[in-house]
Image: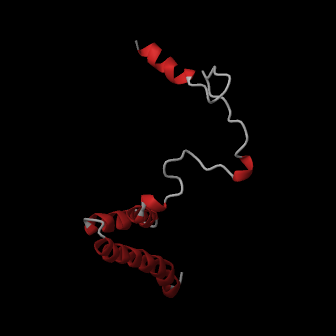
Amino acid sequence: MSTLLLALLVGIPLAWHLGLTAFTYYDAGKVGLEPPMKWTAITFCIPIFGFFIYIFERSELSYDPETDPYRGNNFNIHPSRADDAPLRSRGDDRLSVDDDEWDNHDEDESR
């Protein structure tokens, strides 16, 4: 095998790997993921996947609960489906979902 071809096959991925590791070290200190050496070691020891671990952890820093569309809700319902009757759960023997009897049932069992 040609020396030039071998240098390209090893050198290009190695350069990308070292570049991602250097970016992680620089960026972790800038955004406040402490210690930056921990994230650098993760990125260096677990090639490619370590960088994605860092990126996903970094994205958790910018979470703003005020702008979260799912905050306080289990799921969103499309307006065209808002009038549909909900499905009953296991053990749910109520005739309708609006019965208050279910809340009193839990208190009776705890006594």
> What x and y, as percent, mark residue 7?
47, 83
Measuring 28% from the left and 63% from the top, which residue is drawn there?
A: 38
Quarter of the figure with residue 42: bottom left
> What x and y, as percent, mark residue 8?
50, 83
> What x and y, as percent, mark residue 100?
56, 25
Measuring 40% from the left and 66% from the top, which residue is drawn there?
A: 62
Given residues 100 and 19, the one toward you in this image is 100
Given residues 82 and 5, the one toward you in this image is 82
Given residues 66 and 19, the one toward you in this image is 66
Q: Is residue 89 left or right of residue 6?
A: right
Q: State the colouring used for the structure image.
A: secondary structure
Q: Is residue 67 left or right of residue 88?
A: left
> In the rendered image of this protein, does residue 9 appear above or below residue 47?
below
Work out which quarter of the rendered image holds the N terminus and state it. Answer: bottom right
Work out which quarter of the rendered image holds the C terminus and state it. Answer: top left
> What x and y, as percent, mark residue 76?
61, 50
Measuring 37% from the left and 64% from the top, which residue is drawn there?
A: 61
> In the rendered image of this protein, does residue 28 appear above or below residue 49?
below
Furthest residue in direction bottom, as rendered:
4
Quarter of the figure with residue 17: bottom left
Given residues 104 and 74, the one toward you in this image is 104
